[in-house]
Amino acid sequence: MSKKVLCYLLVIGLLVSGSYAAALEREPEKEGGELKNVIEVRAEGTILHYRKESFWNEIKFSEIMENKTDFISDLIQNFNESLSVYGEGGERGTNAQVEINEKNKSTVLRCDVHGAIRKSGNSYHATFFWLLRPLGLDFIDDHFEESREGLSWEGSVSGIQTTITIKLPPQNVAYAAWQRSIGHCHAHVWWT
């Protein structure tokens, strides 16, 4: 083989391997289009204020923008159905709102959840089965971080980077597993 042919083959080989390496570096498009979820639940009295921001890939976000009305309606309906299916009984959502952020390619669902916190005297008991079950999570088994302000977790749920923050009334001690007056179990939290 001539040197000229070898040079052409070498150049073609470098181009092909460079294209392959560049393709490997790109983040693959997620099947459902969700790239990241940030969930925050904040307790106020006997109401839980729920907020979920979902970040989408370019393709899925374009679909959302083309069908905004249907997307918003389906998102709220799916949330309410999930409350009904995964709740322990009586949890219901009110004041649901959806915002679409074109700059961040994200959607935000806000909702007030009633019936998840029970009050008896000065003691509160909250259930989070409705939040944890659909995600396959558990406060103890999935090692939620305990603090004096609540519980938090970061990890992957079905291949989607997920952050969960549960903000509860500040205490003098952490919301620790199985503690008496201020604590949590697998899907419940209690405080005074």
Image (tube, helix red, strand yellow):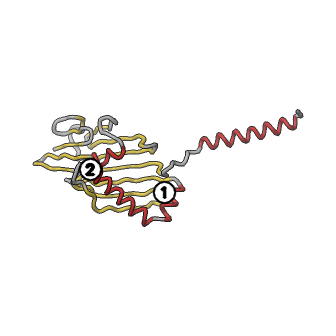
Q: Is residue 141 left or right of residue 172?
A: right
Query: Residue 35's x, y, as percent?
Result: 48, 49
SS class of the residue under badge 2?
loop
The residue positioned farthest toward the top in the image shown: 1
Identify residue type, mark 2: Gly
Query: Residue 8's x, y, as percent?
Result: 82, 39
The residue positioned farthest toward the front in the image shown: 85
Q: Is residue 139 left or right of residue 105?
A: left
Q: Is residue 46 left or right of residue 14?
A: left
> Which residue shows up at 32% across the image and 38% down it?
144
Total numbered labels placed on residues in the image: 2
The residue positioned farthest toward the left in the image shown: 121
Identify residue type, mark 1: Lys
Which residue position is annotated with label 2?
87
> Is the Cβ of the residue at disc 1 closer than 8 Å to that at disc 2?
no
Label 1 to label 2, Cα distance in Å? 30 Å
Query: Residue 159's x, y, as percent?
Result: 46, 43
Tell me if mark 2 has few (under 14), some (14-19) or many (20+) residues whose alpha carbon lies within 10 angstroms of its own.
many
Q: Is residue 45 left or right of residue 103?
A: left
Which residue position is annotated with label 1?
105
Q: In the image, is residue 24 above or below residue 81?
A: above
> Which residue shows up at 35% across the image and 47% down it?
134
> Which residue shows up at 26% across the image and 50% down it?
87
Tell me if mark 1 has few (under 14), some (14-19) or many (20+) residues whose alpha carbon lies within 10 angstroms of its own.
some
